[in-house]
Amino acid sequence: MKRVIVRTCPKTGRQFHVEQPSRRMGVPPMSTTGVSPVKAEQRWFRDIWTGGPYYLLLPLTGLFALVWFLLRVLPKPSRAAYPCQRMAAPLASAFVVWVLGLMGSAWACRRAQYLRDRSRYVLATLCAVAAVVILWGAISATENNPATAAFAPSEPVNSPMGMAQGIHPGRVVWVHDPDATSWDGSTGHWWDDKNTDAKVVEKMVSSALTGLTGRSSDAQAWDALFRHFNKTRGFGDAGYQKPEKIAIKINMNQDRGRELKPGTAIPSPQVVYSVVRQLIKAAGVPGSAITVYDATRYISDPIYDRIKSDPDPELKAVTFVVAPTSVKDGRIGAAHDTAHPLKTVAGTVYLPTCVTEAKYMINLALMRAHTLCGITLCAKNHFGTTYFEKNGWTPSPLHDSSSRQNPMGSYNCLVDLNGHKQIDGKTLLYMIDGLYAAKNQGAPVLRFASFGNDWFSSILASQDMVAIDSVGLDFLRHEQTVNPNMVDVTGNPDNYLHEAALANQPPSGTKYDPEEDGIPL
C-alpha cells in the first residue's frame, strides 16, 4: 500500500507528487523535509568534513603523516629509524586504521538500512552489529598507541632527589678506554682476546673500584666496600669474613644455550673474569663462596670457560647457576626459595637460593635500551632473578608494571624487586659492563655514534642503583638523538627511578612493602 504526498518546490512553486510506502511494509515514512533518513545521514557525514577546520585537523594530520612517511621511507627504508619518521609512523598507521574502520562501518550501516527496508531483519541486525564491531575495533586499535617522542626528562638537569647512597654518596664512576675494544665487526667474535684486550679491561675494573671508593689499591677498595656495607646494615665495622657467600648477577638475556653469533650481546667475559678474580685475589673471597648466575637463562662457554679454564683452583671452584631447563656441562639449575617471598602487584616472586644463601651481591648489568621498559640496566637486571609459582623462571608477569608506556607517578615493580631485603639489603656493588653496548635486549652489539662511531668501551660503577641507572639512561638517551638505529628510549623509562628515589613517599602514592612486613621502603 502506498501513500501520495503533495510537495511544493520552494523555488519555483511547482507542485509534485511523492509516493511513499506505508509503515506496515516495514519502511519508515519520508521525513517532512523530503529527505530520506539515509540521505540525512549522508548529509550529516558531509557536514563533518565541511564544518570547519576543527573537524579537518585530525584527519588532515594523519593524511599528512602518511604521505610524509611514504615519500621519505619508500625510496630509502632505513629512514624509518629517523626521529621524524618514528613520530610520523604511529600517526600514519592510526590514520589508515581509522579510515578503514570508518569506511567499513559506513558500508555495514548502509547495508543494514538496505536489508531493513526489505524486511530482512536478521541480516540487517547482523550488519548493524558488524558496523559497531568494526568501528569499535578501529578505535581500540588506535587509542592506546599514541606517537611517542624520544624520552625527555621531566625534571631539570642537576636536580637530585632522594637520599644518595655509598661511601661517597651518589658517586658514579665512568671508566672509558677505547683501547679495550678493537673488533672490526666481522672477524671472529667481539669477546675474543684479539678483539677485547683483557689487560686493559683489568685496569678499567681496577680504576672503577679505586675511583669509587677513593682508595689507592684494589685490596683497600674492596675492604672499604665490605666495611661500608657492614656498617650501614648493622653488622659492625667488619670487612669480608670467610666463608661468607657472594652472588654475582649477570645479564644473559640473549643466551638460550645455542651457538652464539659473533655479535651476540652478552656480558664481556673479560669483565666477569676480572671481577671474580678481584674478589679472590684482592678481597680474599674463596672461589667456592662465589656464584655467578642468571636464573632464567644459560651462561655459555665464553664466560664459563674463561673462569673455569684458569689454572687457579680458586677460580675453578666458582659456581655457575642457570635456568633449570638449561643445566649441562657443569652448570647448576636454579632452585627457588619460598622462605623469602617478594610481593608485587603481579603476584609473589620467589628468589633463587644462591641469592638467599649469600650475604653479598654484585649487580653486573649491561648497557642497552629495551623495547618494553625503554632501558635495561641494573634495576631490570633482576628480571633474571624471578620465579613465579605458575610461570616458573620468567619475569613475564612483571612486564605490564614496568612498561615505559605507563605514566609518570605510577606503580613500578622494579621498585619492589630492587627494594627487597634479599636484593637491596645484600647488594655490595652495582656495575654496568658497557664495553660493547647494544640497541636493545634482542639486538647485536652496536657502535655508538656519540663516541665517534666506535664501541662504548666503558665500565660504570656505583653503590647507588638510582644514580648509576640515571647515568646509564643519560648515555642511552643522548645516543638516540644522534643514532637512527636507537629507537627504544621513549615514553617514561625513568618512572622507576623517581619511584625508587622517593620510595618512602613516591609520586604514585604506592606503599612499597615487598616483604609485606608492614615496614615500607
Image (cartoon, helix red, strand yellow):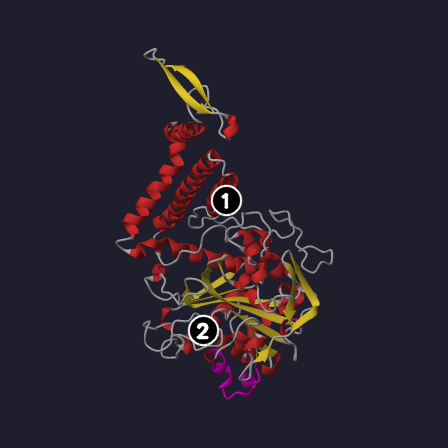
Residue 274, given in percent of the width and then of the height, sits at: 49, 76
Closest to the observer: 443 or 381?
443
Q: Name the residue tied to disc 2.
A: 268
Closest to the observer: 92 or 278?
92
Closest to the observer: 456 or 292?
292
Which image quarter: residue 223? bottom right
Residue 238: mark in rendering: none
Asked whether residue 235 appears in the rendered view, the answer is no
Which image quarter: residue 235? bottom right
Residue 220, given in percent of the width and then of the height, sits at: 56, 73
Q: With 38 as the anchor, is 425 left or right in this view?
A: right
Residue found at x 42% / y 22%? 19
Q: How many marks?
A: 2
Q: Residue 308: say if magenta.
A: yes
Q: Amino acid at mark 1?
A: Val
Residue 417, given in percent of the width and then of the height, sits at: 61, 61
State the SS at label 1: helix
Q: How far is mark 2 from mark 1, CA to CA?
A: 52 Å
Q: Residue furthest left?
A: 75
Examine the rendered structure and indicate whether residue 164 appears above or below residue 67: below
Residue found at x 35% / y 78%? 188
Q: Amino acid at mark 2?
A: Ser
Q: Are marks 2 and 1 in contact (CB under 8 Å)?
A: no
**Which range is magenta?**
303-319
Asked whether residue 78 appears in the rendered view, the answer is yes
Residue found at x 41% / y 15%? 6
Residue 448, given in percent of the width and then of the height, sits at: 36, 62
Mark 2 or 1, closer to the camera: 1
First of labels 2, 1 by sequence position: 1
Residue 133: mark in rendering: 1
Q: With 69 as the anchor, is 442 left or right in this view?
A: right
